[in-house]
Amino acid sequence: MKHFIVVGVLVIIVAALVSMGLGSIQLMPTQASAQAVPIDNLFGMHVKVISFLFSLIVVFLVYSIVVFRRKKGEEGDGDHFEGHTGLEIAWTIAPLATVLYFSYLGAQALAETRRADPQAMQVNVIGSQWSWRFEYPELGIVSDELRLPANRQVLLKLSSIDVIHSFWVPEFRVKQDALPGANMVKELRITPTLIGDYKVRCAELCGLQHAYMESPVIVMEPAGFDAWVIRQTALPTDPVDRGALWAKQFGCVACHSTDGATIVGPTWQGLSGKQETLTDGTTVTVDADFLHTAIVSPDAQVPQGFAPGIMPKNFGDTLSAEQINDIIAYIESLK
Amino acid sequence: MKILKLGIIRGVIAQIVGTAAGVGLVTGLRALMGLPAWAAEPAAVGGALIGIICFLAGVGALTDWWKWALGEEVEDHHGPDPRGWERYFGVSVDHKVIGIQYGVTSVALLLVAGSFALTFRTELVASGIQFLSPALYNTLMGLHGIVMIAAILLGVGAMSNYLVPLMIGARDMAFPRLNAFAYWVNVPGAVLVVSTLFLGGFDTGWTGYPPLSARAPLAMQMFFLGVYVVGLSSILGSLNIIVTTLRMRAPGMNMFRMPIFVWASFATALIGLTATQLIGLSFQMVMIQRLFGMGFFDPEKGGNVILFQHLFWFYSHPAVYVFILPGLGIVSELLPVFARKPLFGYKWIAMSSLAIALVGFLVWAHHMFTAGMEEYLRVPFMYATLLVAVPTGVKFFSWVGTIWRGKLEFPTPMLFTLGAVVVFLFGGLTGPPNGTVATDLHLHDTYWVVGHFHNTMFGGFVYPFFASIYYWFPKITGRKLDERLGKIHFWLMTPAFWVMTFGMMWIGLLGMRRRIADYDPAQGFDGVHLVLTIAAFVLATSILVFVINLIFSVKGGEAAEGNVWRSRSPEWQIASPAPEHNYDRPFKVVGEPYDYGLPGSTYVDMNPAMAGD
Amino acid sequence: MSADTAHMTDYKFKLSNNRLGLWLFILSDSFVFGGLLVTRYYLLGGHRPELDQMLGLIVTSVLLVSSFFMNRAETAIAHGDRQNFIVSTAITMILGIGFLVGVIGFEWRTAPFGPSDGAAGSVFYMMTGMHAFHVLTGVLFLFVVLRNGLRGRYSAERHWAVEACANYWHFVDVVWIFFYPALYLLGTPAG
Ligand code: HEA
Ligand code: HEA
Ligand code: CUA
Ligand SMILES: [Cu+2]
């Protein structure tokens, strides 16, 4: 009995110390959304339970190791004690109750992160290898960065044009995969609460440049957001400038550089007018027609040193004819 | 040609020839069918398949079945194997030889996969690209994962093959030839998996999710095929274990008098036998999609990418219990020996293994909480997931009960056993935060999860595996592993390991994604990553010490006759190394397996009076 | 104990092992087919592929009848009736080949879609292909049994190979009893 009292006291002390120790270091990133609150609270409770259970077993273990170890010259075996049904039942029931309670809390917290605000602003988030595109259908804006007004819920509709990506801003906590397929649009609700610059970081392995599939997320004052909306809705008049904009927004620059470097696809610098050797051995001069085909059906003419099937094949659908012409004008301007 | 006497050499030569023949065959067939003759992918897959079969034929794993099909008589028990090291390099049907073959292969794969880890950990030492291209990083990372998992499966095979027949008093497994086949099929499988490094790599990680895997380079096919073959081995091995356990026990050994490891092995085999088929199926479907343009996982053809994840995790979650149950069985087996006290609550521990295995079938979708699967599944799967904590807890509390008031001794196997308990405890406790959906929305695909599973796999497999090697080495070789080196191994490995996984979990919470070749310096993880890499190298050093110990002790270790650890288990009542057919005559079970501390009690009667005598 | 009876008990012991092993194998294999059924319902739901009903009915009947002959073969050898055993085994094998010809030779050629035409095509070819692969192994197994049977390898007491072959064959047949309605009967046809 004496042993049990000592160990009991030790368990409480150690658990308290561990729990306090963990409480004193920063475990989570800045809390920047309303959805982060229930998640952090639940995680905090997990940390307490983990601290307690870990201490409970380890203290018993260490105590046995220290106190009951075989002393020098000691012979013989330990007590012959085969088990105790009451105890076994007790330590089946207690964890059972704990995990049922945690499941209940988990369901509550999940419901809270999904609570819908009818006033929410919709943003379509489209992932592609290896960039994000954000469309604000109510505002007619397409952007390569996600700007959000603070304290207003946003309803993200996530999709992908190629492989699986995952939308995650650590400061917002919640995460959702973006899937290819027309009927696979997934929803995520976020209410940003803290003004600042963050990043959406693709959290599902999506191939070569997965590590770099990060885009800015900017939470702004509502007034600043409105000003940005006004600036965005006015398009540049020069087709070359518009082309540059599309190239950024539709993620071309994730694979094509404009400075001569090869990222994944051929560089656009000096492309127009160049003699391009294709994989089938033929040589062609790059003109507007060639560029048009290269964009809408990339596998039709693959330059030497590159593989087919990497560049998305559906730009013919996602880009309008004017946008394609703008991009061609832009490529032609890159001497 | 003396060297051709070695089965493995014949096998490898046959595999090379067979692969070439397969490539030719596919190309020829395509030409006949009027398709463009040369297509790299079908040719490679055909070649690999035929290569596997030729390896098995060459090594001699198919000979008996072929003879049987021709109607010739075949004996179930072959003559004695060649003496010495040669017998480990050819087909033997002796479960002890096969167990050692599994074990050595497992350690070899552990070193290979560990070396991959060291390579990419060095890349992660600071942000920015140091020396690995992202493509190579992805390949090494995925290979590290899958080769480690193969190493675990083989290690599990090693423990159950070597120990189960000895512990239940059988002469061998129920199906010795099948047993040999199940081992040998791993070898070409492992060759294929590692060949991906030279065939352009793959970039999907060990999970191989389509549509990414449907677009990955040719090497992806070799990955799928190799893993498929390793899975086949698991299925056949499990079948063998179940029949052996149910049918081959010594007289008097009812189910609740088996050594506890046999229970663990049995529960493991139930998973391996059934669930494995579904990872096989899911991988086959991607292979076929790539080869014939089928659309299972191609949304443009009416496919669905979530379907793959369901099929994949239906196996791959239960598989994690395949990794740990034998290890936890080892813990339950060794604690009583070194505490000199009965196993606390034998029946509860036995039943908890079964419970973990069964509940483990109902939780797979917890890997898909953020994947965009059917939303109504999330909450039920959360409840099921957390339920696994209950039987696992029973094991922990019973272990505490076992050592409480024992007379503890601390030779190396015991150190690794205690290490296993603490490490696995922490790994297990970090499971429930993943399981409650809301928190997983943050934790999914971060280094927190990486930390969680390194903890569970080290605690549930690596530590117990080392414990069992230190413990049964004298049984296998008649010599002991060096104690001093063993202790160095333990005391280097443990702190390094804790630093590594704590660090992983911490940066994971703060926003470090998994499977990235490079990280954003703005997040400020450079320092922690440096520490992680150093810890990884210390860990590797400790394993190097272990390997040196193994090599040295096989020939030069201190001779260890008889019952070194004063165990009650039957395998320690006979000579070491164990004789060819284990026991000269069947023993009889007359008592409880773990009655340490009960004077005059015996577990097995090695020389029972026979009815006919 | 005479050496002979010792041999027989040994054989009986192994026979029970083998039986348990075979049942476990069948259990394991049924997970593959279960997975395929799940795939079918996951991808196609209440729709089914557009297929030739007549052909489906014919191949199904052929396979069911083959199971009857398989059973006859096993019963015959258990009673030591070699003649009947050989004939029934041969008929089973021929019916099995007939099934394969029906599915691969006709159904695969006449189906209004190819393996790469949408989910229905993928599901249909995968399910029938996997099943046909099992039928093919069954046919090979039957061939071995037939050949060894002709050489008088089996007796009323010792015919494990025949028993195993029969059970495997029935299993493959039962699988088709699930596949046939899933592919041909249930749901509304979709192109
Ligand atoms: C050996 C392997 C192993 C083991 C044993 C476990 C055990 C558990 N795992 Fe883990 N897991 C993995 C290997 C393993 N896991 C791997 C490899 C991955 C990543 C795969 C990938 O994506 O690559 C993963 C990922 C993973 C996820 C997905 C995370 C994500 O990607 O988002 C989840 C989610 O629920 C999870 C949960 C659990 C739970 C609840 C347990 C439970 O079984 C743990 C139970 C044990 C305890 C809880 C401790 C002891 C119990 C007590 C002391 C009793 C009292 C306890 C309580 C009341 C809580 N694991
Ligand atoms: C048993 C399972 C197991 C084990 C033991 C390990 C061991 C290690 N793992 Fe493992 N790891 C996994 C299973 C395992 N891992 C899995 C499944 C993944 C997921 C993959 C995926 O996402 O797809 C993963 C992912 C993973 C990552 C995340 C990668 C990423 O997401 O980008 C990291 C990062 O640090 C890591 C590190 C390590 C390290 C440093 C070790 C160290 O412990 C290694 C120690 C070193 C050795 C064991 C080798 C010793 C070698 C020598 C001494 C040299 C001598 C060599 C010869 C003689 C040939 N692992
Ligand atoms: Cu997109 Cu990772
Ligand atoms: Cu899991």
Image (spheres, coloured by chain):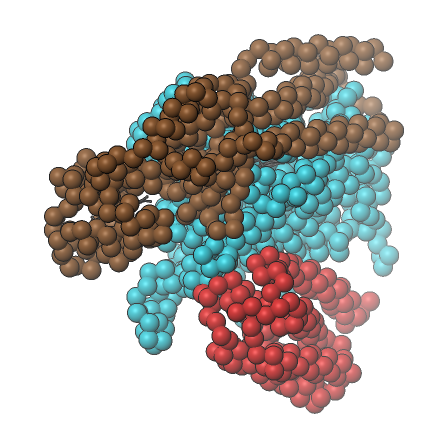
Chain colours: A brown, B cyan, C red
Horizontal side of residue B15 vs B264, given as left or right: left
Q: Quadrant of residue B603?
A: top right
Horizontal side of residue A299 vs A228, given as left or right: left
The relative height of residue B41 versus residue B344 in the rendered view (above or below) is below
Q: Nearer the viewer, residue C38 or B426?
A: C38
Q: Nearer the viewer, residue A140 or B585?
A: A140
The relative height of residue A64 versus residue C165 in the rendered view (above or below) is above
Q: Quadrant of residue C74?
A: bottom right
Q: Position of residue A88 (x, y in %)?
A: 82, 30
Residue placed at 81% from the left, 11% from the top?
Answer: A5
Residue placed at 85% from the left, 13% from the top?
Answer: A1
Image quadrant holding the N terminus of chain B, namely bottom left
Residue placed at 75% from the left, 54% from the top?
Answer: B246
Q: How many marks?
A: 0
Residue B498 in view (yes/no):
yes
Horizontal side of residue B461 vs A123, given as left or right: right
The relative height of residue B10 versus residue B161 in the rendered view (above or below) is below
Residue placed at 62% from the left, 39% from the top?
Answer: B366
Residue B64 in view (yes/no):
no
Q: Position of residue A155 (x, y in %)?
A: 52, 35
Image quadrant holding the C terminus of chain B, namely bottom right
Q: Nearer the viewer, residue C163 or B56?
A: C163
Q: Position of residue B100 (x, y in %)?
A: 56, 46
Q: Position of residue C180 (x, y in %)?
A: 64, 72
